[in-house]
Amino acid sequence: MLETIFIMTATITLISALLAITAHNVVHALLYLVVTMLAISLIFFILGSSFAAALQIIVYAGAIMVLFIFVTMMLHQGEKSLAQERHLFHFSTSITAFVLCSILFCELAFILFLAPSETLNDISIAQLAPAITVKQIGQQLYGPYSLLVVISALMLLSALITAIHISKNAASIEIKTEESNL
């Protein structure tokens, strides 16, 4: 039974990812991307990694919702955009995303409430413990790959310093050109 739910979730993931890529509207693309991230988190949950599922929802789906808010705020162009926003946020324009998301929630409800009573009768609590803990993830990440983690952190730090330096130089160039024009 979980295999069919897994296949359905994988299909929803692929469909919503394709819709996110091919959507002409930014708002709809972000909605499809949120559905994709929720479906991926459900796949993690089905595979037994509830920690990865929670991280997927918090980090990726949450970050995309923040991106969604910023895009709608930046695209706001006055009174003209209010009519466009009413059209964009109307239920009929994003029905596909809501249908895919409701299927995912139905699958999750089935896994949480119906499947345990049917399949978990003969399984002890010790066998239900998560296969991978946060401590094991940390040991695996910082054990054999500690040098790579430090190198990637230094690369990110150097990219941040470079971005700050470039933005300061661009700001000083703009100030100099404004002063020379006066």
Image: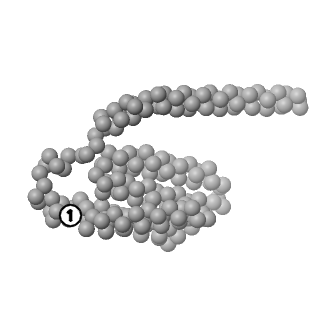
Image quadrant in which you'd find residue 131: top left
What amino acid type should be assigned to the residue bearing mark 1?
Ala
User: Tag count in the figure?
Assistant: 1
Q: Residue at x 57, y 54 (%)?
A: 72
Protein image colouring: one colour
- Point out the residue furthest to the bottom here: 92
The location of residue 124, given as percent across then percent down, is 11, 51
The location of residue 98, given as percent across then percent down, is 43, 66
Q: Is residue 91 something one can see in this rendering?
A: no
- Which is nearer the eye, 23 or 73? 23
For the C terminus, give its image quadrant. top right
Image quadrant in which you'd find residue 24: bottom right
Mark 1 is surrounded, within 10 Å at the Cα level, by few (under 14), some (14 to 19) or many (20 or more) other residues, namely: some
Q: Residue at x 40, y 59 (%)?
A: 39
Q: Is residue 31 above or below residue 178?
A: below
The location of residue 120, given as percent across then percent down, is 15, 59
Q: Residue at x 39, y 50 (%)?
A: 57
Q: Residue at x 32, y 45 (%)?
A: 51
Q: Is residue 137 something one can see in this rendering?
A: yes
From the image, tell me which residue sits under label 1: 115
- Point out the residue furthest to the right here: 181
- Which is nearer the eye, 106 or 135? 135
Q: Is residue 61 above or below residue 181?
A: below
For the N terminus, give its image quadrant. bottom left
Residue 128 placement, left or right of 160: left
Q: Secondary structure at mark 1?
A: helix
Residue 154 placement, left or right of 36: right
Residue 85 placement, left or right of 54: right
- Which is nearer the eye, 70 or 166? 166
Residue 64 placement, left or right of 116: right
The location of residue 152, given as percent across then percent down, is 52, 32
